[in-house]
Amino acid sequence: MGSNISVDMKKTPAFRCETHSEKESLAVAKTLGHLLRPGDWIALIGELGTGKTVFAQGLAEALGCREPARSPTFVLIQTYRPKSGGRATMHHVDLFRLPPGEIPCLAWEDLLSDDAVTVVEWAEKAMALWPPFCLPVHIDHLGEDRRAFRFYSVGDRSAEIVRALKSKKAVS
Ligand SMILES: Nc1ncnc2c1ncn2[C@@H]1O[C@H](COP(=O)(O)OP(=O)(O)O)[C@@H](O)[C@H]1O
Ligand SMILES: [Mg+2]
């Protein structure tokens, strides 16, 4: 299943943007969220406090989920169902507490086969398990409120999503 994303990650990102506030990061996430459909996977990579959970909140909002995504640090996975008129269920996974080298003891295969969007924080901890259609998003801390987002195309589906995101952000 491994998609050898560690190699791809050294490449130039397909799209990069900077934000200067939480609100701006939410706006980027919402734009991306509107492009997602059930089955998509987003791998969020970045140090503590870079804004992975903020980004997941924006995705959940754009998908029309019932509850805002909170930090699921203690529970590994939280599932948000769509409210009426919402577009997809979202699984919000946080691998922060996963000991190095361990395989997450959650139903990974169930997540892969589920008709939902899956968003993984600390995704680098389970790199070998990422599905090949996963979209990796790196977040870098540039300053107190400044963050850089790097989006990688590692397969046809992530390339398609990043292309659409790039064109939308170019006009926004
Ligand atoms: N440009 C920005 N984008 C996202 N979050 C930001 C930004 N500037 C400041 N912040 C703050 O950084 C913190 C990010 O927290 P969180 O999303 O929980 O991080 P993580 O999940 O990566 O540990 C929040 O307190 C948020 O208000
Ligand atoms: Mg978090």
Image: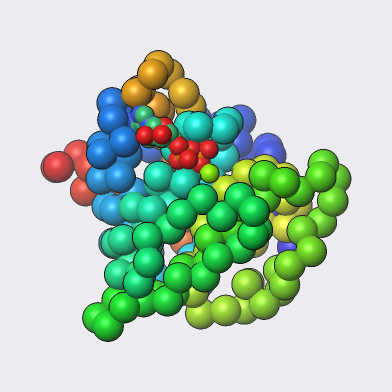
Residue 27 in sight in this render? yes
The quarter of the rendered structure image containing the N terminus is: bottom right
User: Image point 81% across, 45% down: which residue?
Assistant: 99
Q: Is residue 70 above or below residue 144?
A: below
Depth check: 170 or 118 in front? 118
Give percent across and percent down for residue 129: 73, 58
User: Image point 40% across, 28% down: which residue?
Assistant: 148
Give percent across and percent down for residue 32: 33, 53
**In the displayed image of the protein, which residue is found farthest to the left?**
171
**In the displayed image of the protein, which residue is found farthest to the top?**
143
Give the side of residue 91 with respect to residue 57, left or right: right
Q: Is residue 88 above or below residue 25?
A: below
Residue 159 in sight in this render? no
User: Image point 31% across, 78% down: which residue?
Assistant: 83
User: Image point 40% across, 46% down: which residue?
Assistant: 55
Give the side of residue 32 with respect to residue 7, left or right: left
Depth check: 96 or 166 in front? 96
How many numbered marks, from 0 up? 0
Q: What's the coloring here?
A: rainbow
Q: Is residue 152 above or below residue 3?
A: above
Give percent across and percent down for residue 13: 47, 35
**In the displayed image of the protein, which residue is found farthest to the front?**
74
Quadrant assignment, res 88: bottom left
Give the side of residue 3 with respect to residue 83, left or right: right
The quarter of the rendered structure image containing the C terminus is: top left
Give percent across and percent down for residue 8: 62, 39
